Amino acid sequence: MEFEQTFMNFLLHHQEKHNRTYHFLILMDAILSAAKHIEHYYLTGALKGNLGYANKINVQGEDVMSMDVIAHEIVIHYLRTTGRVIHAVSEESADIIPINEEGGRYFIYFDPLDGSSNVSHGLPVGFLFGIAKRNLKGPEDLHLRAGREYIAAGMFVIPTGTLTIAFREAGTWRFHIDETMNYVKPVRLMLPDSQNTWELSFNATNRYTYREGVQEWVKKNERKYTFRYLGALAGDFHRILTRGGMFMYPAIVNHPDPKKNRPDGKLRLMYEASVVAFMCREAGGDAVDEHGTPILSIKPKDHHQRTALYVGSKPLIEDIAKALKR
Ligand code: FDP
């Protein structure tokens, strides 16, 4: 019989090698339990009626589906059990959620179920998370961390049974769930240099609503690469990490109905854009916003702040950044 290394075993060695504490293991164990729990609800959701709307509007003004609420509650439950979390930011909560402000060690920023348009079809969605650490050297001011201050960021693509996680200066790794519900077989990911596999991923119906420079960039480049779009950031970015290319959600500034413009972009900085930007950087890629500013350098002013996002292979990000700065 062949057995693969488990995620927890991998992490234990990683922590030992870098002379780190076991606190992070406790946090990650909770995150894994939460993901498995969400995965189970999602897989059986259609039968139990969990994949419909909950008739509520969330802080972003969008319909909340009952699965979003379930996923949020699952994550918060497991985070509380760790005693290690100072506070959490969740897409599903208007306020920052205090957990253990005195004794906690980590901040966690998460979207428990991203890609809501896929939920009622049972198609892939994401559980994305970024983790930062308390200032251990001086007084903690509880400020909201920019992506470059994260110590780890990852995503589960649910219900495909994959976990992709990046550790600061220690790479981006992918794991698959096995028959015992363990995430196993670490594979280090690096974006491919060869352009043969590169893909572009964006909502093509929006292309004429982008600013002119971005429209021109799309016109000039779209035929060079394959186009793929699932409509769930985690799933789309999952492909980019292995195929290379670029996922983008530009600002919408030329919508025929001006009310539908999104000059600040659509995606959330702290628990979407910074999370994928962090994983991308550790896999050799990059990410910028609508001004060509590195996503990881943006200091959030608000925990639900939105941003435009261009993330993927470095040459493409450098090229689009030039167009964005013009
Ligand atoms: P959704 O609104 O369906 O929850 O979080 C935002 C997000 O999904 C991303 O996962 C996804 O990449 C994007 O928005 C899809 O937006 P469009 O439906 O506008 O393409």
Image: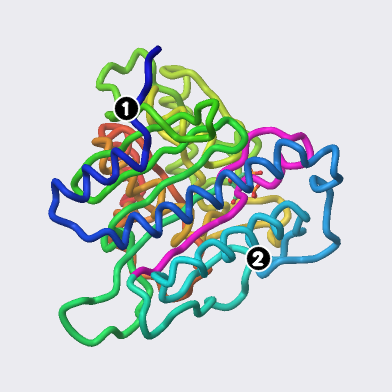
Check the picture and name the quadrant holding the N terminus.
top left
Q: Amino acid at mark 2?
A: Gln
Q: Which residue is mark 2?
A: 60
| Drawn side of residue 15 relative to residue 253, left or right | left
- Left or right of 142: which side holds 127? right
**Residue at image location 77% in from the left, 34% down from the top:** 121
Image position, residue 233 (x, y; %): 54, 42
Q: Position of residue 53 (x, y in %)?
A: 83, 53
Instruction: Report the residue marked by disc 1.
Output: 187
Q: Earlier in the sequence, mark 1 or mark 2?
A: 2
On the image, which quarter does residue 301 sit in?
A: bottom left
Q: Nearer the viewer, mark 1 or mark 2?
A: 1
Q: Can residue 122 be found in the magenta stretch? A: yes
Badge 2: few (under 14), some or many (20 or more) residues near its Cα, within 10 Å? some
Write the start and end of the magenta stretch as one range.
106-126
The amino acid pointed to by label 1 is Val
Alpha carbons under labels 1 and 2: distance apart:
35 Å
Is 25 displayed left or right of 159 in the figure? left
- What residue lies at 63% left-to-right and 60% top-to-bottom? 72
